[in-house]
Image: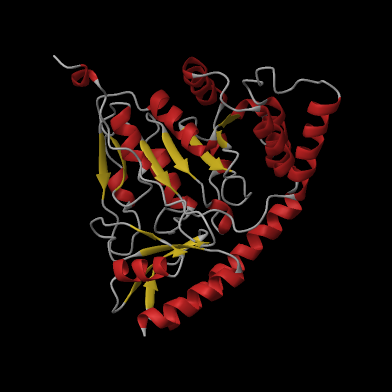
């Protein structure tokens, strides 16, 4: 008998390329702008404290409840601290939520075209799951989620499509599934969607997950949040602290708190990205691309004549990186992250050459 027979084998999540050198990187939905100046200032203060006063913040274990961050989020969002959970990016938060709440023999359900980590976590944690097809316009079919299941997870806006579903549609699904946990993944909600956060007051089975990686430009710090009623957050903490109590480090907690309090900078950044996204839609339509209307910081587009794989490769040869999947139903689409206006102008120029 080989030791390999007892290895837990899974197909891992495939992330977008992280190229080095001078490239235009529009493939991983990162924010094209710097974090809030308040983050840089707080980082400078922390460095001075660590070097000059012997405070020793880094030699001690961090606060396992990330209290400074949770307190700041509570103040800005107007949500009690005991309804907030902080984790190492929304990926960590979601993985812990899968472990905590999807614990039956009945399959968890989520869309067939969605964030490709959902099936990875299901397989890793031995959770049965079933995918439900989006319609031809890449929208969910709400009636499909009014069924027996072991839990529901829906991203809104969806990724990689960018499609946003009205909160009234989401609420019908939450209301029907009151005896299961429904997770709404709002990684991109700041770019035009309306959050379902107010619904946590009415539904004890609702967990809303958000991230600082996109709109707050802190992908490198890994900060994710979950919101729900006290009992739900309590169960999530139990699983997290049983798994690893000290995963969110001191700089992430302190810098995340500084970022969330700078609401003016956050709102300015979001406005700039939305403005560039809307211009991008016009430019892509003029080049004969089609796409579902996006409420995220990316556009999921297909060209009427040129195959997506060819465009992907020709852009890559020009050091412009976008995302392409060789998967059913989406193999002729490219997910294009919204960059700065200058980056998008370079993209448009390259696309004109490629598709003409």
Question: Nearest the camera: 242 or 33?
Answer: 33
Q: Residue furthest front?
A: 21
For the question of whether residue 332 can be seen, the reply is: yes
Left or right, 343 with respect to 316, comes to right
User: Looking at the image, which residue is at 17% across and 17% down?
Assistant: 2
Question: Nearest the camera: 343 or 286?
Answer: 343
- The image quadrant of residue 161 is bottom left
**Rendering coords of residue 241 (x, y %):** 52, 17
Left or right, 48 with respect to 314, comes to right
- The image quadrant of residue 328 is bottom left
**Rendering coords of residue 270 (x, y %):** 64, 58
- The quarter of the rendered structure image containing the N terminus is top left
- Asked if residue 202 is positioned above or below residue 155 in the image, the reply reads above
User: Looking at the image, which residue is at 53% across and 74% down?
Assistant: 346
**Rendering coords of residue 74 (x, y %):** 69, 34
Left or right, 351 with respect to 85, comes to left
- Asked if residue 294 is positioned above or below residue 11 in the image, the reply reads below
């Amino acid at each position: 008998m080989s030791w390999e027979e007892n290895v837990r084998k899974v197909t891992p999540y495939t992330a977008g390329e992280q190229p080095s050198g001078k490239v235009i990187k529009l493939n991983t939905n990162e924010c094209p702008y710097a974090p809030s100046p308040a983050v840089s200032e707080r980082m400078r203060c922390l460095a001075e404290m660590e070097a000059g006063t012997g405070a020793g913040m880094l030699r001690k274990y961090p606060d396992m409840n990330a209290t400074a961050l949770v307190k700041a989020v509570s103040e800005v969002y107007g949500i009690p601290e005991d309804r907030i959970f902080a984790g190492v990016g929304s990926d960590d938060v979601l993985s812990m939520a899968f472990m905590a709440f999807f614990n039956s023999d009945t399959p968890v359900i989520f869309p067939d075209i969605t964030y490709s980590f959902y099936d990875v976590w299901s397989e890793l944690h031995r959770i049965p799951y079933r995918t439900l097809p989006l319609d031809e316009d890449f929208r969910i079919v709400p009636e499909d989620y009014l069924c027996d299941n072991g839990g529901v997870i829906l991203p809104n806006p969806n990724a990689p499509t960018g499609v946003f579903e009205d909160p009234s549609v989401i609420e019908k699904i939450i209301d029907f599934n009151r005896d299961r946990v429904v997770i709404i993944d709002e990684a991109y909600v700041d770019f035009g969607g309306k959050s379902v956060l107010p619904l946590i007051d009415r539904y004890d089975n609702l967990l809303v997950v958000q991230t600082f990686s996109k709109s707050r430009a802190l992908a490198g710090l890994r900060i994710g949040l979950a919101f729900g009623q006290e009992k739900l957050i309590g169960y999530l903490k139990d699983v997290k602290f049983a798994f690893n109590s000290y995963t969110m480090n001191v700089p992430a907690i302190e810098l995340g708190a500084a970022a969330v309090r700078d609401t003016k900078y956050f709102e300015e950044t979001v406005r700039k990205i939305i403005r560039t996204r809307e211009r991008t839609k016009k430019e892509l339509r003029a080049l004969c691309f089609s796409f579902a209307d996006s409420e995220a910081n990316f556009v999921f587009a297909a060209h009427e004549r040129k195959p997506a794989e060819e465009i992907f490769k020709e852009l890559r040869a020009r050091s412009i990186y976008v995302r392409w999947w060789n998967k059913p139903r989406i193999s002729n689409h490219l997910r294009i992250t919204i960059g700065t206006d200058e980056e998008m102008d370079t993209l448009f120029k390259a696309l004109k050459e490629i598709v003409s």
